[in-house]
Amino acid sequence: MHNYLDFEKPIAELEGKIEELRHLTSDGELNIADEVSKLQGKVDKLLRQTYGKLSPWQKTQIARHPDRPHAVHYIETLIEDFTPLAGDRAFAEDRAIVGGLGRFRGSSVVVIGTEKGADTEGRVAHNFGMARPEGYRKAIRLMEMADRFKLPVITLVDTPGAYPGVDAEARGQAEAIARCIETCFSLKVPLVSVIIGEGGSGGAMALASANTVLMLEHAIYSVISPEGCASILWRDGEQSKVAAEALKLTAEDLLKLGIIEAIIAEPLGGAHRSPETMQASVGEAIAGALKGLGALDGGVLRTRRRERFLKIGSAARD
Amino acid sequence: MNWLKNIVRPKLKQLVGGQKDIPDNLWQKCPNCAEMNFHRDLENNFQVCPHCGHHLRLSASDRLKMLFDEGEYQSIELMASEIDPLKFRDRRKYTDRLKEAKSKTGLEDALTVAHGRMGGINVVVAALDFSFMGGSMGVAVGEGLISAARLAIVQDAPLIVVPSSGGARMQEGILSLMQMARTTIAVEEVKDAGLPYIVVLTDPTTGGVSASFAMLGDVAIAETGAVIGFAGARVIEQTIREKLPEGFQRAEYLLDHGMVDMVVRRHDLRATLIRVIGLLINTSPAADVLAISASGRGSLEDES
């Protein structure tokens, strides 16, 4: 069954009714099928209405939806022969960042993703997608390997941000992130990033310093969470809704600001309503992005990646 | 070379001793030991408490003055960036906050970029001023660092960056986050040119600033007692409910954890920098160095 968000209450009620009716069909009543399809029509209409005018705060909730497909789900469906690789060779394996070798549409690639975990156990194991320095250092290791073997890098970003803990600080969280960004800009292979859920601050930037940055329709990407921003600038955590608005964190806003190349449309009602459709469109989008980059020389790829970001500030100025 | 003409129009500002304000308070209480210090005593001691050695924050101009030979330097005019790209408003308008910061500090934004000589070596220094919106990094700071990097490359000079910043400037939203990438590229350009990139981490260096250009120095020097880290201590305490160890995120803590090369007292900073740079570029003082800097500066001085 779906986990419904607050603003989806009317949809939840209708779908609840449909569910009830479906249990009755065994009685063989003829008009039940009609009733169901009528209700389904209403649900679709309501979904279209609701999802056609989502506020940034509502998008934030969808981006964090517990049923939303995560990095591992995209890897499962899009990457063949996925071979996870572990560890930073210095301290530990950080499961907040998953990564490894695999085949995307027949060609070898390196895939790296921040993974939030799907259930309680998984969330704890993956630390809710909040990586420690060793996670970023593993990502650096994998990117450098990709560079050595001339394999494109695909990153899937879904993180509330880097882990703010004593141990992470002790091992150089800031340095690890900085070095990860630096590594992204040193690669001579195509680097494509997809913001699949939450693009949380430096923890996201570390993996999204790419040639092409794609973003799911209801994903968010921001310098700080709306909650964090509200508590600092408004001194009132309740103002998250207003902060989400002010931060311009939706895919639509970011496309306008020149931060991302394209928006990947989500199925009606969000990625979690039809993960297969979502995964297929993400696959298409990545393939499209890689196709354009594949023909370029390594040095050109690196230069263009840098130019892409250098341009961003200037774009805002024009 | 066009960018130089368009962007960096070096302007000789009468910075030495220029616009010296009469302090509001002649006596200042040390935030560490609570002793009262006469403002002149602090000034003569690089804003270090004579009683306990606590390093108070330095303005960018005081910082530049203490680093360059005879306190002489030329600051470059930074390209104006779009003000308030997101039309941001929290309890107050961002434009109002900016105006207030400008009038309070006399600065255009948090970063000052200057060039001059240190121990006879031509260097470019970019310093953040914490009193300008917490030294926060938005488009202007990012642009400034890119200009600083390119100035260093044109002058064939080492780049020294002195952060003092809480991190990204939230009021510029995603554009402030992008400065992490852009400043990293600036650093890469300096490194690609084979020039030394030295960072002097001062109080505080946190958030998006620490997680980008500030932690990428060829040599990382931390000033005594400076708070340096990624997440703020309060955030860690609140979200993780962990008790923070003694001296957590202080310069000395980072040294112990292998995150900086050395912790240096402010009094020794200039001499340390001169020595480190001299060693990195492997020149005996005077002649060689002057030859490089003279050719690098020629075109700039023509304009000023």
Image (cartoon, helix red, strand yellow):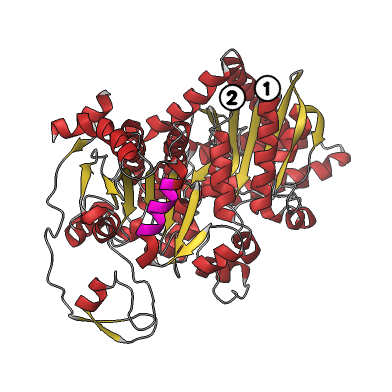
- What kind of residue is marked 2? Lys
Q: Tag 2, which secondary structure?
A: loop
Q: List x then y, in percent, for residue B89.
A: 31, 53
- Foreground: B107 or B101? B107
Residue ID for mark 2: A188
The residue drawn where x is 56% and y is 63% is: B255
Identify the mark at residue B221; answer none if there is no mark: none
Q: Is residue A245 visible?
A: yes
Q: List x then y, in percent, for residue B143.
A: 33, 39
Furthest toward the top, the residue is A295
- Foreground: B125 or A19? B125
**Is B274 part of what is drawn in magenta?**
yes
The residue drawn where x is 60% and y is 42% is: A197
The crowding category of the residue bearing disc 1, from other C-alpha atoms within 10 Å (few below 14, some 14 to 19, many at least 20), is: some
What quarter of the picture does the C terminus of chain A occupy?
Answer: top left
- Pointer 1 and pointer 2: residues touching (CB < 8 Å)? yes
> From the viewer's perspective, is B214 left or right of A155?
left
State whether residue B195 is above or below residue B54: above
Residue ID for mark 1: A150
> From the viewer's perspective, is A266 left or right of A91?
left
Q: Which residues are magenta?
A: B270-278
